[in-house]
């Protein structure tokens, strides 16, 4: 019984006094530079407005490009014709301190058991190109594959808008301690 009271006292002291002082306050601040980032990317990317969408979100700017610009259906090899677009994105990222997450989104199809595997392979190939050919630091880039799990619109038609897309998420926030 004595041990029970001792443990209870220690827990009370831990949670009610010093514990709250030992937690580091971390807050995330949204940077207003997203509008400027959008202007820059709009000015330099040589794409038809039907193939590109810009979305401002709290984590930064999402530059969504139709996946057909980069890949043939069910392939993971980057099209030669898309390299000028990638080179432009690389040139812009070289001038920015921002991290970039390359996210691939693929509609449901019968060619792959797991669409996220196709998505991940495609985003990884783009990141690999950006590192090896664009000389961007690997620490600045991340790749993610979502498959059909984050559609731009519902997966109800084979060619439904921007469901097959590559998102270049230019992160625009920083953790403050």
Image (cartoon, rainbow, N blue to C red):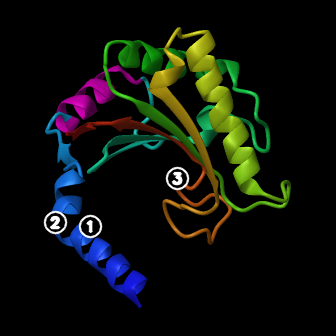
The picture quadrant where one finds residue 33 is top left
Depth check, mark 1 against mark 3: the one in front is 1
- 19 or 137, which is in the foreground? 19
Q: Is the Cβ of the residue at disc 1 closer than 8 Å to that at disc 3?
A: no
Q: CA distance from mark 1 to mark 2?
A: 6 Å
Q: Residue 50, percent across and down?
A: 45, 44
Label ID, residue 56: none
Q: Is residue 44 above or below residue 39?
A: above
In this figure, which residue is indicated by the disc labeled 1?
A: 14
Q: CA distance from mark 2 to mark 3?
A: 52 Å
Q: Residue 39, percent across and down?
A: 23, 29
In this figure, which residue is indicated by the disc labeled 3?
A: 162
In this figure, which residue is indicated by the disc labeled 2?
A: 17
- Does 171 lie within the magenta span? no
Q: Quadrant of the N terminus?
A: bottom left
Q: Secondary structure at mark 1?
A: helix
The segment highlighted magenta reads 34-45
User: Which of the marked residues, 1 or 3, is nearer the chain's N terminus?
Assistant: 1
Q: Residue 119, percent across and down?
A: 68, 46
Q: CA distance from mark 1 to mark 3?
A: 52 Å
Left or right: residue 158 versus residue 41 is right
Instruction: Name the residue: 56% across, 46% down.
Output: 165
User: Which of the marked residues, 2 or 3, is nearer the chain's N terminus?
Assistant: 2
Depth check, mark 2 against mark 3: the one in front is 2
């Amino acid at each position: 019984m004595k041990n029970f009271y001792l443990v209870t006292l220690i827990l009370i002291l831990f949670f009610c006094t010093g514990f709250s002082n030992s937690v580091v306050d971390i807050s995330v601040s949204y940077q207003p530079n997203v509008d400027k980032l959008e202007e820059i990317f709009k000015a330099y990317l040589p794409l038809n407005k039907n193939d590109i969408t810009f979305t401002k979100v709290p984590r930064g700017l999402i530059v969504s490009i139709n996946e057909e610009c980069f890949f043939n259906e069910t392939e993971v090899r980057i099209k030669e014709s898309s390299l000028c677009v990638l080179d432009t994105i690389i040139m812009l990222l070289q001038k920015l301190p921002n991290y970039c997450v390359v996210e691939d989104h693929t509609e449901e199809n019968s060619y792959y058991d797991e669409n996220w595997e196709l998505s991940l392979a495609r985003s990884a190939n783009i990141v690999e190109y950006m590192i090896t050919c664009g000389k961007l630091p690997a620490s600045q880039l991340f790749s993610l594959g979502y498959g059909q799990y984050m559609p731009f619109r519902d997966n109800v038609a084979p060619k439904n808008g921007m469901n097959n897309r590559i998102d270049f998420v230019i992160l625009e926030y920083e953790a403050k301690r």
